[in-house]
Image (cartoon, grey):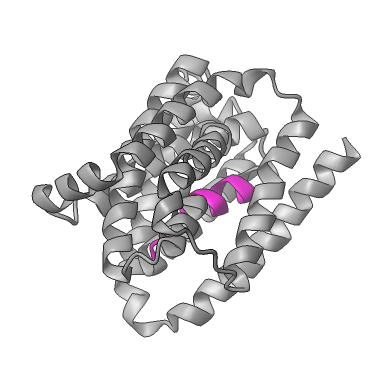
Amino acid sequence: MFQDTLALMPLWAFAGAIGVTLFAGFVKGATGFAMPLIMISGLSLFIDPLIAVAGIILPIVMSNAVQAFRFGPSEAGGVVREYWRYILIVCVTILIVAQFIMVVPTHVFYLILGVPVVILSLIQLFGVRFHIPESRRRLAEWGVGLVAGGLGGLTGTWGPPTVLYLIALETPKAKQLLVQGVVYGVGSISLLAGHVQSGVLNLTTLPFSAALLIPAYLGMLLGFRMSDRLNPEMFRKVTLIVLVVAGANLVRRGLMG
């Protein structure tokens, strides 16, 4: 596995990928968010973006499985019954959009990665809130679901649009965590299937993604242990600021072409 990974990148880049993934796992364990955003924005700074997308797939599946399994089957079933349209739209869109990733030019891909990271991080950083009335919920499911699934298929992250959607519906905090766990868990299966089909995750890139499972899991364990000692709001804001800077650098690389 190690030799296969070093065929894709130099040793220093692999070490950097482990560091980024460890930090992303820590943030996921401590705050429950931002793992895909941190990984894709961080890895794309020094690794080919397609390899970066392949690398994040198995850690995303693992972390979302851990989050989803924290809830019982009856609770998860209730979420599926209530949010089945949104879940279906996100998953189908991930599967479809993932098939186009191989034909996107590199400089355009940097923009696709960077622009959403900057915008979504700024929205969360400044606490921008939207409101969706019950009469518009069906329309919002389609609109936000398509956006979230499109981002998921290309960048591996559909969490921020989902969080903003749940907040706009004024979903109680405890229920938000439950819904996110189900949406992320089911969506990660679509991501895996989509990129096996697209060719991004293949026999060459699979060992790299598998190697990142270890630092991702260790980071999550450390984050779980440290969550009670951290100021979660301050840590969240610092993380979002880092994401804005990383995303802006990706935008710069895309514009410089």
> Is 36 one of the magenta-colored residues?
yes
Left or right for 115, reference 61: right
Residue at (25%, 47%) from the top-left corner? 82
Compare residues 37 and 187 and report the one nearer the observer.
187
Vertical relation: 55 (above or below) 97? below
Q: In this view, does 49 lie to the left or right of 80?
A: right
Compared across the picture, whether 68 is left or right of 170 comes to left
- Asked if the stretch drawn in magenta spans residue 39, the answer is yes
- Disc tally is 0
- Residue toward you, 39 or 33: 33
Quadrant location of residue 227? bottom left
Q: In which quarter of the image is residue 206?
A: top left
Going 64% across and 52% down the picture, which residue do you hit? 117
Q: Can residue 44 be seen in this view?
A: yes
Q: Looking at the magenta stretch, what is its main secondary structure?
A: helix
Residue 26 picture location, percent across and down: 42, 63
184 over 167 or under it: above or below = above
- Residue found at x 76% / y 55%: 248
What percent of the width, then of the height, locates residue 197? 45, 15
Q: Residue furthest front?
A: 135
Vertical order, 37 against 23 (above or below): above
Residue 153, position as x, y percentages in the image: 52, 32
Residue 181 coordinates in the image, percent (x, y): 30, 52
Q: Nearer the viewer, residue 117 or 62?
A: 117
The N terminus lies in quadrant? top left
Magenta residues span 32-42
Query: Is residue 1 something that shows in the picture?
Result: no
Q: Is residue 150 above or below residue 236?
A: above
Quarter of the figure with the C terminus = top right
What residue sits 59% from the left and 50% below the top? 16
Among all residues in the image, which is located at the extreme right?
Answer: 256
